[in-house]
Image (tube, rainbow, N blue to C red):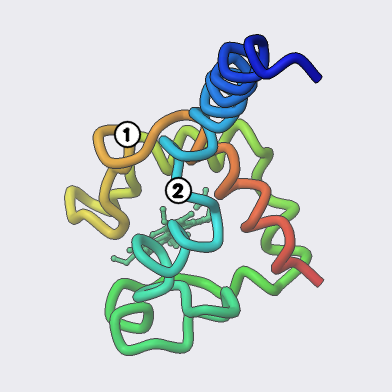
């Protein structure tokens, strides 16, 4: 290999790697977001057997028939806008907290709980 060429080649490769890595670095992964933003109510396993979950009235996401009541689109919409019941906020809106990509990844994560 010609030593004169090795440096620019390396930095190009590095630049390409950095570019490829950007989206993943910006968006925290779904498991991390679940723990950080959702697990307090819905539980690590989606069963919502947590104090906050009981207080908010979160339902068991491992319940297959329950999950069939909504489409991915509907979940996404409710994650964006939140859930209110008679004017009382049950689940806060996440659209200013998480990106569309992150919310979509969380919808996919929610689906993994259903039995
Ligand atoms: C403050 C507690 C709380 C937090 C935090 C929370 N949720 Fe919820 N979630 C609820 C409650 C309460 C409901 C509504 C249950 C009902 O009455 O149907 C709900 C409903 C849902 C549903 C059912 C779908 C639907 O259309 O109703 C999904 C899926 C869901 N949450 C996912 C999430 C995700 C993903 C996060 C994190 C980004 C999250 N939740 C954070 C309390 C919470």
Residue at x 54% of width, y 53% of height: 30
Instruction: Name the quadrant of the C terminus.
Output: bottom right
Name which quarter of the figure residue 24 lies in: top right
- Label 1 secondary element: loop
Measure how far apart labels 2 and 1 are at the Cα level: 15 Å
Q: Is mark 2 within 8 Å of ligand 1?
A: no
Q: Residue at x 41, y 35 (%)?
A: 26
Q: Earlier in the sequence, mark 2 or mark 1?
A: 2
x and y, in percent, of residue 28 in the image: 45, 48
**Marker disc for residue 28:** 2
Residue 107: give its label.
none
> What is the x, y in percent for residue 51?
31, 89
Quadrant containing ligand 1 reads: bottom left
Q: Residue under circle 1? A: 95
> Quick check: 10 above or below 95?
above
Residue sitting at x 61%, y 22%: 10
Question: Relative to 11, does residue 87 appear above or below in the rendering?
Answer: below
Circles 2 and 1: CB distance less than 8 Å? no
Q: Is 71 placed above or below 48 here?
A: above
Left or right: where 101 falls relative to 3: left
Q: Is residue 63 above or below residue 15?
A: below
In this view, the mark in front (2 or 1): 2
């Amino acid at each position: 290999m010609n030593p004169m060429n090795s440096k620019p080649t390396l930095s190009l490769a590095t630049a390409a790697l950095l570019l490829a890595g950007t989206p993943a670095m910006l968006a925290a992964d779904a498991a991390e977001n679940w723990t950080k933003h959702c697990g307090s109510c819905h539980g690590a396993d989606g069963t919502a057997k947590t104090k906050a979950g009981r207080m908010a009235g979160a339902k068991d996401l491992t319940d297959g028939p329950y999950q069939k009541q909504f489409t991915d689109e509907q979940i996404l919409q409710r994650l964006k806008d939140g859930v209110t019941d008679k004017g009382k906020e049950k689940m806060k809106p996440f659209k200013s907290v998480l990106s569309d990509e992150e919310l979509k990844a969380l919808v996919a994560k929610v689906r993994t709980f259903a039995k």
